[in-house]
Amino acid sequence: MLRNPLPCLASPEPEPLLYAWWLRCWSLFCLGLIALTWPLWTGQSLFPQVPVFSWATMLPAWCDLLGVSILLASLLSVSLLARCATARNFALCAGIGALLILVLLDQSRFQPWAYLAMVLAFCMFAFQPSDAIRWMRLLVVSLYFYSAISKLDYSFLHTIGQQFLVTLASMIHIDIGKWPLTVKLALAAGFPTWELLVALGLSFPKTRIAAVAGAIAMHLALLLILGPWGLEHRLGVQMWNLYFIVQTVFLFGLFGSPEKTSCKGNGTGELAEQGTKPAPEKQPFFARLVVWSVVLLPLLEPLGWFDHWPAWGLYASRTSQVTLLVHRTATNRLPERVRRHLEDIGTKNESVELNLDDWALDAVHAPIYPQARVQLGIAESVILRWNLSHRFMVVMSGTASRFSGKRQRRILQDLSALRRQASTYWINSRPRRVTISLQAEH
């Protein structure tokens, strides 16, 4: 199994020109997504950054500029030199390294599209084209599968799923406000069910054409729901869905499947072709191990041992989160670009909420990393930078129950409690020093 995943995902050796065009499309979409989220990658200091390791909190801002420069150069090189295997492999390797450094400096950069780009780049670097296609297909199928499973829960069906449903219904002038709740929940469940059927259909040659059509229809529907005619999400979200259409057409449509291939295999995970002997595998063990880790690690997410986004919890609403409340008397310490994201939580309450998600979208043009660990570091940076002292309250909400939507909550009202909580995580939860005023900390 480790050597040759799902024989039905196999591909013949692709035409060099077609494979080059796939590389160009992949790199150009990556460049486009970086451009649309440019502030996220440039070492800006307004929105707090939370590195992966505590020692990285001390690194200066020029490290970000160096990393993004290498990343842009590598993606441009892949696009221009796609037909030269040696040059493109060197560029892919440099791009993977640069992206790893950038994520090391700020966990918010671990966007789902950036993570997918990284692992696809690794496949194209580590394997020959036909083997790379097989492993990329496995990754995409697992992404659709985990994404569907993450949405088959109480939270999605009652929140985001209902938003999707109402938005789609309003486009065809149907008012579902008075429909029975059970009907609306069943219809909302159709979104992840469709995605799950796409994952299963893409896994087998006989159903692949229908599944490709189903995937394209699904992403076109998301473009309508999330686009300017619907929920008006950022342009990056729309480009991400457009990229998936192109990716599906290339990986599962244009590259095809080997002729006369039995999906049963030969008992060892190798392809069993009529009248031919399977060619020996030349895939490095470490590369296979890396891809299998990406495929299997999301199984740990329900246990709280793996993050939501790399587990492909896309459009899921059960993620852990942090709410930062600021006393009304301290709001004038915040700059205007931050104050405009303050929201009242009640007329009699002495605090207002700083909407961290809206602030992230405004400051770095990307959604906030959906992990309480990272958001706790962002809250600490705000408290230190603008000297909020004891005029704040942090409410930590755990992952919502899959069956009831209930969350466990914890309230932190001073810096010592906040830092004790930060010390409980294996991965760093402290903000980077370039996003903290040193005078305010002292």
Image (cartoon, grey):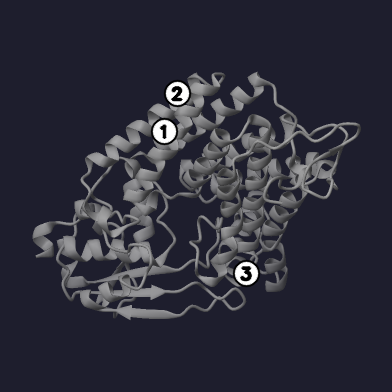
Disc 1 residue type (three-letter): Ala
Q: Amino acid at mark 3?
A: Asp
Q: Secondary structure at mark 2?
A: helix
Residue type at mark 2: give it.
Ser
| Whole-percent x, y for residue 256 in the image | 76, 32
Disc 1, SS: helix
Q: Within 10 angstroms of label 1, few (less than 14), some, or many (20 or more) residues?
A: some
Q: Nearer the viewer, mark 2 or mark 3?
A: 2
Is 148 left or right of 273, judged from the image as shown? Answer: left
Q: Residues within 10 Å of mark 3 (few under 14, many from 20)?
A: many
Q: Position of residue 161 (x, y in %)?
A: 61, 62
Task: Give the image quarter of residue 387.
Answer: bottom left
Q: Which mark is residue 94?
A: 1
Q: Which mark is residue 248?
A: none
Labels 2 & 1 near each other (Cβ < 8 A): yes
Residue ID at (64%, 44%): 219
Residue pointed to by mark 2? 77
Residue closer to the observer: 62 or 370: 62
Name the foreground residue: 60 vs 377.
Answer: 60
Residue that badge 3 annotates:
153
What separation in Å lies between label 2 and label 3 (alpha carbons)?
43 Å
Q: Give the CA separation, mark 2 to mark 1.
A: 10 Å
> Does 330 sit left or right of 289 as displayed?
left
